[in-house]
Image (tube, rainbow, N blue to C red):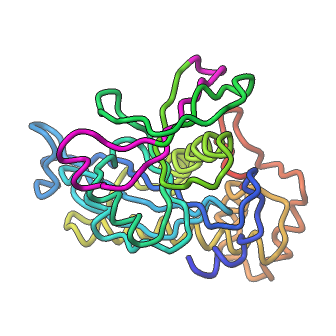
Amino acid sequence: MATARSLYADEDLGVELQQTVYALDSTTIDLCLALFPWARYRAQNAAVKMHTLLDLQGNIPAFIDVTPAKIHEIHTLDILLPEPGSIYILDRGYLDFERLYRLQRGLAFFIIRARKDFRFRRLVSHPVNKNTGLRCDQTIRLQSFYPAKFYPEPLRRIRYHDAETEKSLVFLTNHFDLPTLTIAQLYKCRWQVELFFKWVKQHLRIKKFYGLSPNAVKTQIWVAISVYVVLAILRKQLRLDLSLYTISQILSLSLFEKMPLLQAFQQIGGTSELGQSCNQLDLFNL
């Protein structure tokens, strides 16, 4: 992971920032309850969750934790070590003000969706350009007893109307220096972690497991993640203008042929006959 992240450190995020930007989320991997009773999830289901911290510069995982699905994703914040100066983009499932204050004390920044029912007191309203979809930019303090106790400092509240989905989104952040529109643009980048989950599930065979123990399941998931990272490293080091899917297909076909790796890709060229299906997921064109 460290090698891949260093190779993709100069990738264009689409937003001009010098800070590292992470997206934290989890995905559920279904299991058969009869074969994996240790992973019971609800009455008739079994599953594990893959909690992932994705570096959005290159979409390379920086941290992964595999747990039974009954463990709520919010507990990932308890084992996450904040990186000072970095920005963490979170879904509202991670909204816990005590845990968010740990990020604040760790000198890290966060951007998170707000719930509709939280109470706050407005301190300052800042002007915004409503033609960009922004509706308000406010400095607030929490009012409810426990949230105000756990997060005693001011927060920034931004409301944004997404013209594509016709939805109004409210963000909370402790970053007061970024332009208001940049906050909304950064949260939109969080979708990359969803594409990462879909790509891994679709192409790296973690729907069927060869072992039944917790260690066997975790091992197979980690093997899949390792393959993803190795493909990303290979693409960068060999300067290949091919998608990760195409690279994996070429390697699977020529795995037991004795030839230099670069030669195998040069035979295919920039337009591979393997191609991609029309519904192929596009994850940073990899």
Q: In this rendering, is residue 272 above or below 76? A: above
Q: Is residue 148 magenta?
A: yes
Q: Is residue 253 visible?
A: yes
Work out which quarter of the rendered image holds the C terminus and state it: bottom right
Q: Is residue 229 left or right of residue 35?
A: right
Tell me which corner region of the image, top left, top right, bottom left or bottom right, holds residue 229: bottom right
Where is residue 212? Give x, y as percent. Answer: 21, 63
Work out which quarter of the rendered image holds the N terminus and state it: bottom right
Q: Nearer the viewer, residue 69 or 182?
A: 182
Where is residue 40? Give x, y as percent. Answer: 13, 49
Q: Is residue 222 magenta?
A: no
Q: Is residue 285 visible?
A: no
Q: Which residue corresponds to the image point at 53% horizontal and 66% vertical from the top-left?
A: 61
Tell me which corner region of the image, top left, top right, bottom left or bottom right, holds residue 91: top left
Q: Which residue corresponds to the image point at 83% horizontal and 48% vertical from the top-left?
A: 273
**Farthest residue, direction front:** 123
Q: Which residue corresponds to the image point at 74% horizontal and 22% vertical from the top-left?
A: 131
Q: Nearer the viewer, residue 180 or 276?
A: 180
Q: Nearer the viewer, residue 51 or 138?
A: 138
Residue range of the region highlighted in magenta in the rendering: 140-166
Where is residue 112? Give x, y as percent. Answer: 45, 45
